[in-house]
Image: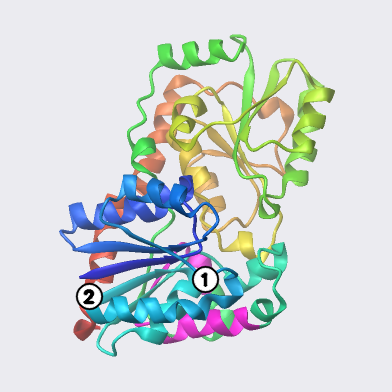
Amino acid sequence: MIVYLTYNDAPSGIFSSQVIDVVRFLNAECKANVRLVSFISVRGFFSNRNKIKEALPKALVLPMFPGVHRWQWNQVVLRLLFFLWKPKIIIALSVLATQLAMKVKNKSTKMVYDGRGAIAAEWHEYQVVNHPMLLNSIFELEKQCVLNADFRIAVSQQLIKHWKEVFNYESNKHVVIPCTLSSQFESVKLDEISIQQKRAEYGLNSDDVVMVYSGSVAGWQSFTLLLNFIKPILSSGQQFKMIFFSDASKQIEELIHQFPEQVKWVHLSSEKVAENLIIGDYGLLIREETVTNRVASPVKLAEYLACGLKVVISNHLGDYTDFILQTNSGFLFQNILTQQLKQVSFQDKIQLQHNVIHKVSKKTYLSEYYQILEPASLN
């Protein structure tokens, strides 16, 4: 048996594409016996448990002890579980899940650290966690995961570089797998009539140039930077439209008040995002240059491209800035001129989709997944 372990990660669009879809893929394509074990908050436990179980009926969803700083208290339950199941491989998402697993696993069990970013940097740069004890210990905890795991998954080459520079990581026992597309985005079918019909639903004119922002309004999304980019473009002409698929925010409300005929906000469930993104010409992925963003692999970029949008991107964003420029799939936001923003042709949309499907399809990384699943004795 193989266990995929998560800690304090609630069901969401990201959880669905980067955890649930991965478990499904490993079981279906690699013929592995992978079972998800998720420790989630007691707040909304039964609702969130049902969401995970609906997607993965065999998943074991457990309540974590209240307070993320009490993460070690969950060892007792996990130790009993591993004693009963005796997993051959444990894949743990991020730092605290990996720490839990390393403390209770059998010595012969292969420990795989699924590194989704520069966690210590992210916590300090964006106040993801406010507890002083955790903030003081996260650097050492992350270092132990990187150096002591038997194998590692990184989402970007830049994350590997970060490990080498910050933690003196010297091993080659790792694979790089970017945040891959969920099944709904891999199966997006683009056709001109559907795009026109969906644009009409939003009241868009035939000559409108549509910018889209889809995702979180959390700190690392650098929302103020994004808004400062948008405002001059909207001011330059009524044909420029901006649509937000996100949570509500006061900044978006202010932008709508300033440009009532050009800006729209819609909150969508994760299942509805793909069918609505196709209305856009450009997807915005503008973030400040922090360690968190330099090593990132934002799945939102892949989703934009899969729906036929060019990407307006910031510099040094994981491995993706170079990819966008090399494939002519968008522009650097620092260098863009308003006159460059024109409607993206249907033929270009098809090419954009083709470019990204190969790069971020799980099937592209089948050999990397097989390396993860090799038994410990082969390392």
Left or right for 5, reference 289:
left
Residue 187: percent from left, percent from top: 32, 33
Quadrant in the picture for the N terminus: bottom left
For the question of whether residue 151 can be seen, the reply is no
SS for dot 2: helix
Q: Amino acid at mark 1?
A: Phe
Is the stretch drawn in magenta largely helix, strand or loop?
A: helix
Residue at point 27% right, 62% down?
35
Residue that numbered label 1 is attached to: 65
Q: Which residues are magenta?
A: 137-161
> In the picture, residue 107 is in which quadrant?
bottom left
Residue at point 29% right, 78% down?
82
> In the picture, residue 177 is in which quadrant?
bottom left
Q: Nearer the viewer, residue 249 or 70?
A: 70
Disc on res. 53: none
Question: Is 108 a magenta residue?
Answer: no
Classify 10 Å Cα crowding around label 1: few (below 14), some (14-19), many (20 and above): some
Residue at point 55% right, 56% down?
43
Q: Amino acid at mark 2?
A: Trp
Q: Residues at badges 2 and 1 in contact (C-beta under 8 Å)?
A: no
Quadrant in the picture for the C terminus: bottom left
Disc on res. 85: 2
Question: Is 147 a magenta residue?
Answer: yes
